Amino acid sequence: MAKSVYYLGQLSMEEDADPCGSGCKGVVCSKTHSVTNLHLSSANLSWGIPTAIGGLQELISVDLLENPKLTSTIPRQIGQLRRLTHLKLSGCNFHGKVPEEIYNLNNLEYLDLSNNPQLLQCENAQDLITLRRQQSLTVSRRRLLHHRTLLQVNGRTPLPLFYTYIALAVVGLVIIVTFTFCFCRWLSVRRTRHADTYMMTPIAPSMPK
């Protein structure tokens, strides 16, 4: 997969090579050696995007701008990239129909398919992406609100609020203990002073009869 994905028909590489460890230009990887970004604009790439790209589950951004020798169809496997936020394919020569799977990517924020004369695409593709993104955010917010409601109905307190209650209880306990200690200390000192004063008071001698 490494050979077909990272070299896109132009470069050569062993099948079992690690693209994150071989210094591939334009390939950005995470600390866990997962490919997260492909920045290959104006790289004189040829042929097309291999279907194996669908296996890069950590991929966030794909930039293949201005590679006119890319003449294949756009593989529907791109629709498997659930974390993809940016897809830039402008200035190439892709043909055929844009896979519907791309429009259904929940995290996709930016899509550029312009300047592909033979590519059959939706005229308001970016509007569809924006609408899809807004709908996804709305659903996520509703799920979060529903989850919080269930916690309240079941008598359970969300963890952040629960920790706040614990902190307040600890502070209150510290205040009570401190006040009790100070009061007992003050009372002890007062009693000691009172006893010393009583012992130091002279007793008047009785008059002889």
Image (spheres, grey):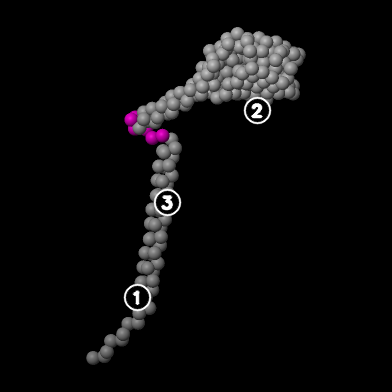
- Circle 2: residue type: Lys
Q: Which residue is mark 1?
A: 198
Residue 124, position as x, y percentages in the image: 52, 19
Badges 2 and 1: C-beta atoms under 8 Å apart? Answer: no
Determine whether 66 is above or below 95 in the image. Answer: below
Q: Position of residue 118 (x, y in %)?
A: 63, 10
Q: Secondary structure at mark 2?
A: loop
Residue furthest toward the bottom?
Answer: 209
- What's the residue at 54%, 16% (across, down)? 123
Q: Which of the two discs, 2 and 1, labels the residue nearer the N terminus?
A: 2
Give the residues drawn in magenta, as a range: 153-158
Q: Earlier in the sequence, mark 1 or mark 3?
A: 3
| Element at label 3 | helix
Q: Dot 2, how many residues are within 10 Å of its Cα: few (below 14), some (14-19), or many (20+)? A: few
Asked whether residue 50 appears in the rendered view, the answer is: no
Is 154 included in the stretch rendered in magenta?
yes
The residue beneath circle 2 is 31
Is 95 contained in the magenta span? no
Q: Earlier in the sequence, mark 2 or mark 3?
A: 2
Q: Amino acid at mark 3?
A: Val
